[in-house]
Amino acid sequence: MNMKTHSIFLFMAVSTFTGIAQDSLSTQVWTLQRCIEHAKQENVGLQRKRVAVQQAQISVADARANRQPTVNFTSSQQYSNKPFQSSTPIVSGDEVISTTNKNSYSGTYAVNATMPLYNGGSTSNNIKLQQLNSQIAELNVNVSELTLEEDITKAYVQILYAQEAVKHDNEQIALSEKQLERAQALFKAGLLNKADVAQLESQTANDRYQLVADESQLDGYKLTLKQLLEIDGDRAITIADPSLTDNVMAPLPAKAEIYAIAVANRPEVKAQQLVMDRSDIDVKIAKAALLPTVNLSAGISTGNNTSGGNMFTQLKNRWNNGVGVNVTVPIWDHHKTRNAVAKARLEKENARLTLVETEKTLWKTIENYWQTAYSNQHRYKAAQQKVNAARTSYELTSEQFRLGLKNIIELMTDKTTYSAAMQQMLQAKYMAVLNTALLKYYGGEKINL
């Protein structure tokens, strides 16, 4: 088997494997929990947040390293040429020798170290600051995860609602087509005029148009979910259809109870509380600039040149050790430190206000979920009765129309009433389920439909 044949088989194998993987993804039934787990692994925005955590951890390591001394090695090598230098007489015994050395070479070598002894607590406070930044970054990941779960749940419930709306549309089309067939038979028998038949044809066309509109809405909801899952928009996904009837009228927990749990556990609140703590440290770091700094320095150095004799002897004779303490006392800095302290205190106040705003936003969100769930539960209960009454009326009118006892206007009116009642019940059902689930989610429970 030649190389070309090998390449063909390899291409076919890779293509087959890729196709199987794509088909597997398309044929899988996506439950809500599977969607959430997949998104947590694949969502690009969430991955960026995790990278930010790693960067924050590196910043902590950098801050800790500032406690260690800084050590540097320096060396300078210099070559000199003096083309017009005159000869130098050198006496050797009874002879006077004239010599000229127009080239010279010199080298210096030094190792210096500096270590901070005192800087007003800036180093230790900076370590604490970076540790808080790392914790905030981790909490931001949790915030993004919770937001992603909420968005996926909303998109998932919207798909369930749209799927049931499409199912209802198909049922309405089937009824309209059946009525149209009956009307056409009555028209041929001379028992119904052409105008009545045209009205039923128009009603059937409207039902088909509504189906197209709802299918388009369903595709839009699926696209939103696939974008959250980072799945190619061209791939079809199948959503698991859980039974939600028992969850529509689930008891609602008290708003105050949910808020107390949420404000104590939600990561966005914890993150903002850490931002306030970080502001306190910023104030301390700014104040440290008013205090003196003390650094310990030490170094060794040596050197040699071509005119100084033996190289190793020169390095030994020129060896120099040194140690010192450097003290810097701030006296006047054009109010830069004072202004920095004032800015840090303002940032602390701003952080406090942001925390208050975060807590208020949390309360508004919980209150909105509770109110929406409560109102839609009552709407659903009323809509059920309305649907039952409209269905009974429509079925009776349909039978009477078949017997010639009701006209086309009465039939279409009852059908429209039944369809509208069904639509209202579906909307109330899924809004109640969604908002109840999200309300309990803020209370610390796992999202469960």
Image (spheres, helix red, strand yellow):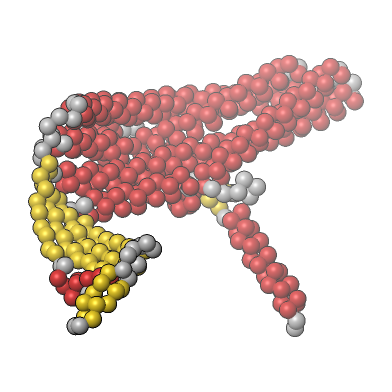
Give the quarter of the figure containing the N terminus. Answer: bottom right
341 is higher (above) or lower (below) than 34: above
Left or right position of 9 against 88: right
Where residue 267 sits, quadrant-wise, is top left
Where residue 328 sits, quadrant-wise, is top left
411 is higher (above) or lower (below) than 448: above
Front-lying residue, 267 or 202: 267
Q: Residue at x 61, y 36 (%)?
A: 220
286 is higher (above) or lower (below) than 117: above
| Residue 186 in view in this figure | yes
279 is higher (above) or lower (below) than 402: below
Q: Residue at x 21, y 29 (%)?
A: 336
Front-lying residue, 421 or 336: 336
Left or right position of 295 against 168: left
| Residue 79 in view in this figure | no
Q: Residue at x 47, y 31 (%)?
A: 431
Q: Residue at x 51, y 43 (%)?
A: 228
Left or right position of 235 against 440: right
Image x and y of residue 344, in percent: 22, 30
Front-lying residue, 178 or 30: 30
Image x and y of residue 146, in percent: 38, 42
Image x and y of residue 96, in percent: 24, 77
Q: How many tags in the picture?
A: 0
Image x and y of residue 263, in percent: 26, 34
Give the quarter of the figure containing the C terminus. Answer: top left
Front-lying residue, 50 or 343: 343
